[in-house]
Image (tube, rainbow, N blue to C red):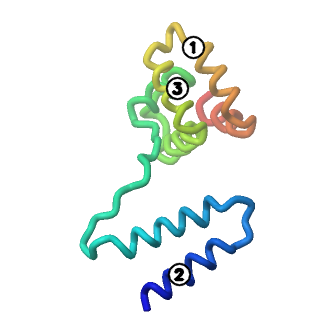
Amino acid sequence: MIVLTFITTSTIMYLHPIKNNTLGQEKLFKSLNFLISAPGEVFKKDEDIHTIDNETLNHFIAFYSDKSVDSLEVFEKEEIRYILESMGKYNTRKLKKLLLDSEKEGEKVLKLLSENLFDEQLLILDEMLK
C-alpha cells in the first residue's frame, strides 16, 4: 500500500507541468527520505539562514547614522536588519567584513548598499537613520 502511494505520488509530481523538473525531483527526494527515515530521527536543516548579528547591526548603525544605537526602537533595528539581510548571503558577509574596517572602507560600504538594495530600501534606511 505504501509503495503504491509512493509510486502514484512520484508520478504525479514528475508529470506536473513545470519548466524544469528540479522542484518535482526535490519533492520526490524529500518524500523518499520521509519514508525511509526512522520514526524518531531528527531532521536536519537544509542550510543555515544568513543573518546580521547584533554586533554587525550596531556597527552599521554607527557607521551609517548620526543617531546612537540606543536611541532606536526595537522595531526600527529589526527593519534595518531585514533590509540588510535582503542583500543575500554573499553581500551580508561582505558587509560584515567591510564594517570591521569601516574607516578605510566607508565608500565601499555605500557602494555595496547602492548596488544591492532597491531605491525604496535605501530611502527607508535614510529616513530611519538620518
Q: Callout 1: 10 Å neighbours few (<14), some, many (20+)?
A: some
Q: Examine the image and state in which quarter residue 126 appears.
A: top right
Q: Which residue is under mark 3? A: 95
Q: Kindly indicate whether the residue at mark 1 contacts the one at mark 2 (C-beta within 8 angstroms).
A: no
Alpha carbon separation for disc pair 2 and 3: 47 Å
Image check: 112 left or right of 1?
right
Q: Kindly indicate whether the residue at mark 3 contacts the one at mark 2 (C-beta within 8 angstroms).
A: no
Q: Which residue is under mark 1? A: 106
Which residue is at a point 43% across and 49% down the rendered structure image?
Answer: 47
Image check: 73 left or right of 54?
right
**Does 80 sit above or below residue 10?**
above
Alpha carbon separation for disc pair 3 and 1: 11 Å
Image check: 18 left or right of 65?
right
Q: Position of residue 40 (x, y in %)?
A: 24, 73
Image check: 11 left or right of 30?
right
Which mark lies nearer to you, 2 or 3?
2
Q: Callout 3: 10 Å neighbours few (<14), some, many (20+)?
A: many
Three-letter amino acid code at disc 2? Ile
Nearest the camera: 125 or 85?
Answer: 85
Which residue is at a point 43% across and 29% down the rendered structure image?
Answer: 56
Q: Which mark is residue 42?
A: none
**Does 85 sit above or below residue 26?**
above
Q: Residue furthest bottom?
A: 1
Q: Callout 2: 10 Å neighbours few (<14), some, many (20+)?
A: few
Three-letter amino acid code at disc 1? Gly
Which mark lies nearer to you, 3 or 1?
3
Q: Which mark is residue 7?
A: 2
